[in-house]
Image: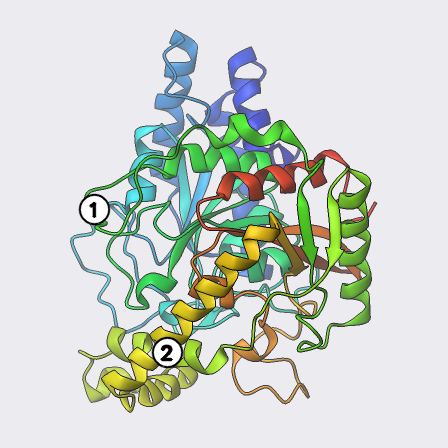
Amino acid sequence: MSELTELTATRLADGYRKGEFGPVEVTRAALRRAEEIQPEVNAFVRLLADDALERAAASEERWRRGEHLGPLDGVPVTVKDILLLRGAPTLKGSRTIDPAGRWDEDAPSVARLRERGAVFLGKTTTPEFGWKGVTDSPLSGVTRNPHDPTRTAGGSSGGAAAAVALGAGPLALGTDGGGSVRIPAAFCGIFALKPTYGRVPLYPASAFGTLAHVGPMTRDAADAALLMDAIAAPDSRDWSGLPPAPGLFSEALGGGVRGLRVAFSPSLGGQVRVDPGVAAAVRRAVERLAGLGAYVEETDPDLADPVEAFHALWFAGAARVTQALGREQRERLDPGLREICRAGGRLSALDYLAAVDVRMDLGRRMGRFHETYDLLVTPTLPVTAFEAGAEVPRGSGHRRWTGWTPFTYPFNMTQQPAASVPVGLADGLPVGLQLVAARHRDGLVLRAAHALYEAGVTLSGS
């Protein structure tokens, strides 16, 4: 049983095809693993055991008849409790949402997985409305790091990251408005991709607007590509969604990095203080890219810190998502969320549009940057996981979570694809490397990440 929970989705599909094991056995193992880890890390809002086993049994019969629905048929998947999943309440970490709703619709990404026979294990934890870079909420409490339960799993897709890291399903759907798949991926030692905005449709539309992306969280880049092949499909409910991808992501992994022009920015031009252990692990991985044939230059993008503009966009979104709540409901919100909602409510339309101007100029500058460089490489985060239940590291002097995530949120503003790859440990905790490419070049990010995996760059740092 434990061996099955360590397999990637790609390996599971191969095993189903060969008859080595079946979806029911795999789903039972994943559910058992989820139950085992829940008391310590608190990755799940709810498990959906009966539905999961029913879907697994149907999948097993399809595989037996040779009529499977593709490589994700019968593969366990978890869904962040921000995304709609038919038949299960989506409470978004909040006590202000009534669980007695209709819950009769899937989010687009969930619908695509349902069509392909995936098995939904359960809903994973999130901070309230996904508002911050760690995962704790008034509804579900604190989610903890799989490498050290006294530390945070990161957020806002912290439950998803912990579940994947500990074998409770090889695939997870997360959301990312300022780093929310990449932050927990880096802290928990897994892979995550924030695709180009619109590549994976989103419905209902996020109150955080075009900052919010849906992305895969997986054991490796190959599994993420497999998941992207399914979820990167148009859905009429998302008016800002992109047309179909030009080809399968899983078929474009093998090109390697030879000849790619890579810009390595270890600290965004000295703007960011990076922990020495993090910096060393990232630099070793960059040297491996160079050894694989990439042309690496240590240089920085023209990226003056856009945090105030990001705050205007983010705080206004938070104010919007809670706008309809009455006084009693507001008192039930996470205190930090209440605070940024008040700040967002004080912003004028002109303040918001000024932030949009900063965003557009940032996008222009990054577009010019990628005329010279295929990829930008940075640390995903300047720190390793800190104490659980805190928004910022103790003694850091940061006021909000954006203080320790300077490498992630700018690329939500520019809508570029960005991934976090685990590249080693610092003081026993995972370190992530971030790969960023120009808009619409998601396949290039996955290809470069896959090259690192193929070269053996893992949590061990080898």
Image disc number at residue 105: 1
> In the rendered image, is residue 156 in sight?
no
The quadrant where residue 342 appears: bottom left
Furthest-top residue in this view: 65
User: What's the CA distance linking mark 2 and mark 1?
Assistant: 34 Å
Label 1: state its secondary structure.
Answer: loop
**In this figure, which colouring scheme has been used for the structure?**
rainbow
From this viewpoint, is residue 77 visible? yes
Q: Nearer the viewer, residue 88 or 285?
A: 285
Q: Is residue 120 above or below residue 368?
A: above
Instruction: Point out the image quarter for the N terminus.
Output: top right
On the image, the x and y values in percent for residue 151 come to 65, 69
Which amino acid lies under the numbered mark 1 shown in the image of this protein?
A: Glu
Q: Is residue 279 left or right of residue 149?
A: right
Give the number of marks: 2
Examine the image and state in which quarter residue 12 appears. Answer: top right
Tell me the quarter of the image containing the C terminus: top right
Q: Secondary structure under badge 2? A: helix
Above or below, 445 against 18 in this view is below
Q: Earlier in the sequence, mark 2 or mark 1?
A: 1
Location of mark 2 (residue): 355
Residue sitting at x 76%, y 51%: 286
Mark 2 closeness class: few <14, some 14–19, many ≥20 residues within 10 Å:
many
Q: Position of residue 103 (x, y in %)?
A: 20, 51
Q: Label 2 amino acid?
A: Ala
Q: Which residue is located at x 67 percent, y 41 percent?
A: 260
